[in-house]
Image: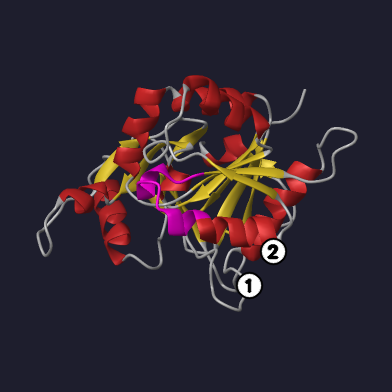
Amino acid sequence: MRKTKIIAIGGGSVYVPCQPATTLAIDEEAVRLAAAELPIGRSTVNILFIPTASRDDIDYCHSIYTHFGLRLGCNYDHLRLIADMNTRQNIEDKIAWADIIYVGGGNTRYMMREWDKRGVSDLLRVAYAEGKVLMGLSAGSICWFGAGLSDSNKFDAGSGEDWEPMWVTGLGLVPLLHSPHFDSEAWRRRELAYNMAEGRLSKPVLALEDNCAIEVVGNEYRILISRPWRRAYLYRNGNRLRLHPTSNFQPLESLMT
């Protein structure tokens, strides 16, 4: 039986003209994980991009294709739930085809609602149990956790209007809470500090800076970085702990206790 696999990235860019993606080292690890379990007779990894959070932005699809398809040599396809006419069978076939499922950033709340309406949430849980590599950044990292600190209200607010941070429920595959973009969006640090001081955190929170990721394989984890000095933090029991990148895996349970 294959181990479950998740790579959740705090943020970064897969498209930098004439330069490697800022998340390249992390993305290469995802391809390595998937390639190690390809069936006999197949040598190329299949990656499926799900851009629901960006409302199926076609330019985002082109960027992922350029990075994973052309640079990293994967077979590429995308699942545009809103823009394309997809039957239930078509959705199932695309997810079954994939070795890696990459979820893009954007409006997390909108994405989770659309997934639930179309049965994608359940299909992704099946893909997880089958040992496919599930990954993504921003909204595409929040979705794998119990819940994530999100700016989804910003997408509904008018230009210049105030908005409130919110927690969006994810698929619960990683039994922690989560915040991406911990270095590039200062409001996240303030919000987590306030929530911790007020005793409002129901579970430990994993906070990831851009170009930093958690790789969870089975019941073990490690922190990955693709740029120097990137950091991960764990908010737990009123304390903030620094998690360091390492080549060795640690028990995932150690983050909860």
Residue type, numbered disc 1:
Pro
Residue 71: mark: 2
Residue 241, how many percent across, how many down?
48, 55
Residue at the bottom extreme?
A: 18
Question: Residue at 51% across / 65% down in the picture?
Answer: 13
Tell me, yes or no, whether the highlighted magenta stretch contains residue 116: no
Q: Residues within 10 Å of mark 2 (few under 14, many from 20)?
A: few
For mark 2, give the secondary structure. Answer: helix
In front of the other: 61 or 3? 61
Sequence order check, earlier mark of 1 and 2:
1
Residue 157 placement (x, y as % from top left): 14, 53
Tell me the residue at 20%/48% (across/down): 153
Establish if 207 lies above or below 109. below
User: Which residue is tagged 1?
Assistant: 20
Mark 1 vs mark 2, CA separation in Å? 9 Å
- Magenta stretch bounds: 50-61
The color scheme shown is: secondary structure
The residue at 40%/53% (across/down) is 57
Q: Secondary structure at mark 1?
A: loop
Check if mark 1's residue and mark 2's residue have beta carbons within 8 Å.
yes
Can residue 10 be seen by looking at this rendering? no
Q: Position of residue 235 (x, y in %)?
A: 41, 49
Give the total of numbered labels: 2
User: Crowding near pointer 1: few (<14 within 10 Å), some, many (20+)?
Assistant: some
Residue 144 located left or right of residue 70: left
> Of all residues shown, which one is farthest toward the right?
41
Viewer-proximal residue among 121 and 149: 121
Q: Is residue 39 left or right of residue 149?
A: right
Quarter that holds the N terminus: top right
Q: Is residue 57 magenta?
A: yes
Q: Residue furthest front?
A: 85
User: Horizontal placement of 113 versus 87: left or right?
Assistant: left
